[in-house]
Amino acid sequence: MSDPRIAAAERLLAERGLPDAEVSAEGTEGEIAAIRLPGGPEALLAERELTKAVRALGFRFVAVDLG
Amino acid sequence: MHKRRRLLEILHECRSVVVGYSGGVDSVFLARIAVEALGRENVLAVTGKSDSIASWMEDTAREVAERFGIPWMELETREMEDPRYAANPSNRCYYCKSELWARLSSVAAERGAVMLDGSNADDVGDHRPGAVAAAENGVRFPLLEAGLTKAEIRAWSRELGLPTWDQPAAPCLASRIPYGLAVTPERLRQVERAELGLRALGFRDFRVRHHDRVARLEVHPAELGRVAELRPEIARAVRGAGFTRVLLDLQGYRRGALNEGLGAGQLVQLGAAA
């Protein structure tokens, strides 16, 4: 069964100008929204509001892949 | 100035002390002041040695003790053999500190000494189950009793020439593993190896949080810019420690992050000095 949080997070990121972002739930309880950005993590480093919005979808942590 | 006087009064009340000495800002300061107040013959700083103690903390503990003439010893602790500790509940520190203070009790008893813990006034209200274990073993908290804050301890440490005066907070390696995920020697080694890798790249204030296969890095906001510059090196260092995925937490390093979300019933808060 797919995690609805993931689709919601990807939609949110697309709306904020990151349509290629891929989200997966990592951690033993799926507590981390792990975001992979094709261009690297820099686009997200200063995005506090976006981070808050993704957390509000039900994640404890929001993190970006470093490759 | 009255806080400094009060601290010295407390130490003189104790006459002979055994200090739980981690190599962190507070315990180094406490041991150094104790030597100044009571003389070397009445002070012993003891560092608990186990898989959960980072090698760089052990090195700091030893080097500062040698440099400042603080009588020092290491004592093996076996909290890892306690399944209640290894299960990593939210009060894990209670079992760890119970083991530490129980072992230090016999050392202190031989010397007729009072055991001291370096908790300070800023720790009041924090989640500190280890403090319950300390209190159960008759440990005193002189820095807390004197009302000294972290900033005041750092300032006084700097006056004393202690190299730890601006050292970032340094809890044990088990603090990197989320509650509920077992603390194992292998996981602790992975964290240590990954953090050594980041230290070698010049990072000072960060944590590598262990989420089983995944490492979630918390880096102080002031150091985030360097993450972008050193991304391949960071990923290589952390993967080299055995993690399959390396993530950067977008909230950055914040003290006690793994305590976020603990319910009121799970929090064990250090109370103010009476």
Image (tube, rainbow, N blue to C red):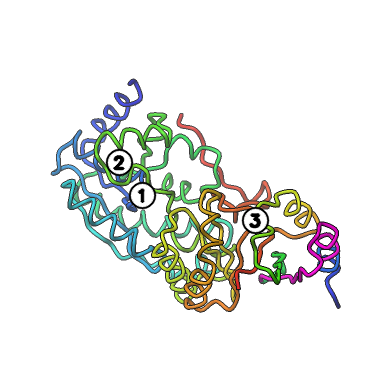
* Foreground: disc 3 or disc 1: 3
Mark 2: amino acid = Phe
What residue is pinned by disc 1? B24
**Is A13 in the magenta?**
yes
Give the amino acid at mark 3: Leu
Q: Which is nearer the N-term, disc 2 or disc 1?
A: 1
Label 1 packing within 10 angstroms: few (<14), some (14-19), many (20+): many
Residue B139 % position (x, y): 36, 44
* Spatial CA span between label 2 and label 1: 8 Å
Q: Which residues are magenta?
A: A10-27
Q: Would you name the residue on which mark 3 appears?
A: A45
Quadrant in the picture for residue A66: bottom right
Name the chain under label 1.
Answer: B
Q: Which of the numbered marks, if any, corresponds to residue B194?
A: none
| Chain of the residue where label 3 is placed in the rendered structure | A
Instruction: Give the left or right position of residue B31, taking residue B148 as reference.
Output: left
SS of the residue under disc 2: helix
Residue under circle 2?
B29
**Mark 2: few/some/many CA within 10 Å (<14, 14-19, 20+):** many
Question: Residue drawn at (45%, 50%), measured in percent from left and top?
Answer: B133
| Residue beneath the point at 66% across and 62% down | A63
